[in-house]
Image (cartoon, rainbow, N blue to C red):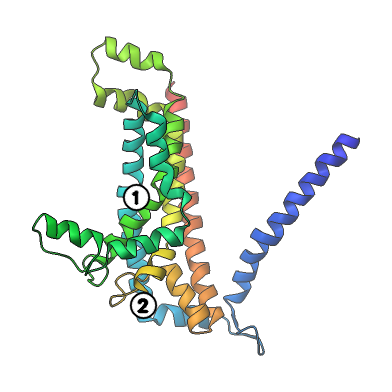
Amino acid sequence: MQRNLTAYGFLCAALVCFAVFSWYPIVREVILSFQKTNFVGDTKWVGLKNFHRVIEDPSFSAAWKNTAIFTLLALICGYAVPFVTALLLNELRHARGYLRFVVYLPVMLPPAVSVLLFKWFYNPGPGLFNEILRFVHLPTLAWLDSGKTALISLVIVATWTNMGSGTLIYLAALQTVPAELYEAAELDGAGLLRRIRHITIPQTKLILLVMLLLQIIATMQVFIEPFLLTGGGPDNATVSVVYLMYQYAFNFNNFGSGGALGLMLMLVLVIFSAVYLRLSRDDRDGRAARV
């Protein structure tokens, strides 16, 4: 009985934490999206007016377009690069611990510090990247000041800052693959690419699918990179959905419209996650039935 009471006590504490810090903000945002308030004066119910105002904003379509492109590019770079890095680290026989530390090092820096470090790298004058281009006699770039390069510049920052965590997770998954499978494949004459295709990817598929889902959800909420590096510019080329939400709430003092935009993003992510999990489950059930 005493053990059960202790267990219920821990369970209640966890539920209270979730209710206060996770569930209440979600409910509050839903309510806020139908209200007009600045948390100082009177609060009024305005129905769908906040949604109409957000949709009619010229930045609305640009924000969703930029968020989709950023997610796609961040997925190509931020999903593939850590996996390939983990494969290389897994194949090494020497200095593996040192290289793991080097790869994980960016994660130890606060995100704001990492982003501001890249702000100096992208400086069109004495910035590191343009100095490298001058050294190899290539034309310099206006990294953050050009609509053609600003968004990809943010993708590079996001990939660098998040690469360490992804690499370590992939590396941990790779080390669960039985070595006997690789030894048997080598005896059959399988090369590196065939071993990756027929052993590594199937054996780590669950982790790959989970990481894919988490990465898409995280990159669609991109905020700190456009906030600190470009301010959404130039000409809305890097404005994201979450950055536009921040502008409504704290620059325009319109928390209702910010809440409406947040609710839209949450619904998109919920629908995407539900479809993704359903397709993953159907694929798993289909493979189980074939076995």
Name the residue nearer the viewer: 222 or 33: 222
What amino acid type should be assigned to the residue bearing mark 2? Ser
The quadrant where residue 25 appears: bottom right
The residue that disc 2 covers is 59
Name the residue nearer the viewer: 184 or 131: 131
Residue at 90% of width from left, 36% of height from top?
Answer: 2
Q: Position of residue 185 (x, y in %)?
A: 30, 15
Q: Is residue 240 left or right of residue 278?
A: left
Q: Is residue 58 left or right of residue 21?
A: left
The residue that disc 1 covers is 75
Q: Is residue 31 visible?
A: yes
Decide: few, some or many residues near mark 1? Use Cα within 10 Å; few <14, some 14-19, many ≥20.
some
Q: Position of residue 242 (x, y in %)?
A: 45, 68
The quadrant where residue 95 appears: top left
54 lies above or below 182 = below
Kindly state the secondary structure of the residue where label 1 is placed.
helix
Decide: few, some or many residues near mark 2? Use Cα within 10 Å; few <14, some 14-19, many ≥20.
some
228 lies above or below 14 = below
Residue at 43% of width from left, 60% of height from top?
Answer: 113
98 lies above or below 36 = above
What amino acid type should be assigned to the residue bearing mark 1? Leu
Kindly state the secondary structure of the residue where label 2 is placed.
helix
Q: Position of residue 273 (x, y in %)?
A: 48, 51
Where is the N terminus found, in terms of image quarters?
top right
Q: Determine which of the numbered discs, if any, sits on residue 269 in the image.
A: none
The quadrant where residue 54 appears: bottom left
Q: Position of residue 64 (x, y in %)?
A: 37, 67
